[in-house]
Image: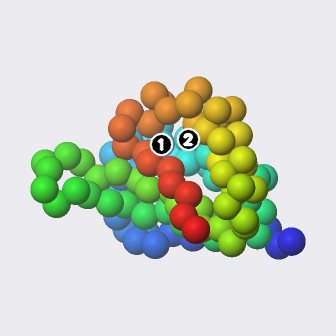
Amino acid sequence: MGESSLVWLNTADIQSVLDEVPSLKPLVDEAYNYLRGLFSGEEITIRASRDPEEASPDVLVIKVTTNKEFDEADNLWQSFTNDWWLPNYDRGGDRLTILLDF
């Protein structure tokens, strides 16, 4: 299986968020490294997103798109959530979201 790479979808907007909140950079790197260990060969993207109905600042969204069977992907996702995401969630300050897509 091939190695996953983090694909930046809107580079300028992502960089703007990282410049505004420098503490997100190491968090994004750590999340990506953990995810690629679990979802090797799967597409992992990052984008900056803003809710048009709210005055909230941009957030970074990391999305893992998988072709794995649901049960296998769900088990890996639960492992990621329990072992890494929940212990690190507060570090994102509501500016990082991580999703799994089938």
For image coordinates 69% across by 32% down, the residue present is 83
* Nearer-the-camera pick, 87 or 66: 66
Q: Quadrant of residue 85 in the image?
A: top right
- Specify the quadrant that holds the N terminus: bottom right
* Amino acid type, residue under disc 1 in the picture: Leu
* Nearer-the-camera pick, 76 or 17: 76
Q: Which residue is mark 2?
A: 27
27 displayed left or right of 3: left
Q: Residue furthest right?
A: 1
Q: Give x and y (percent) for residue 14.
A: 40, 60
Q: Which residue is mark 1?
A: 24
Q: Give x and y (percent) for residue 45.
A: 54, 66
* Nearer-the-camera pick, 80 or 27: 80
For image coordinates 46% across by 28% down, the residue present is 90
* Nearer-the-camera pick, 44 or 13: 44
Res. 4 visible in picture: no
For image coordinates 65% across by 67% down, the residue present is 66
Instruction: Reply above or below: 43 against 64.
Output: below
Q: Secondary structure at mark 2?
A: helix
* Amino acid type, residue under disc 2 in the picture: Leu
Badge 2: how crowded within 10 Å, few (<14), some, or many (20+)?
some
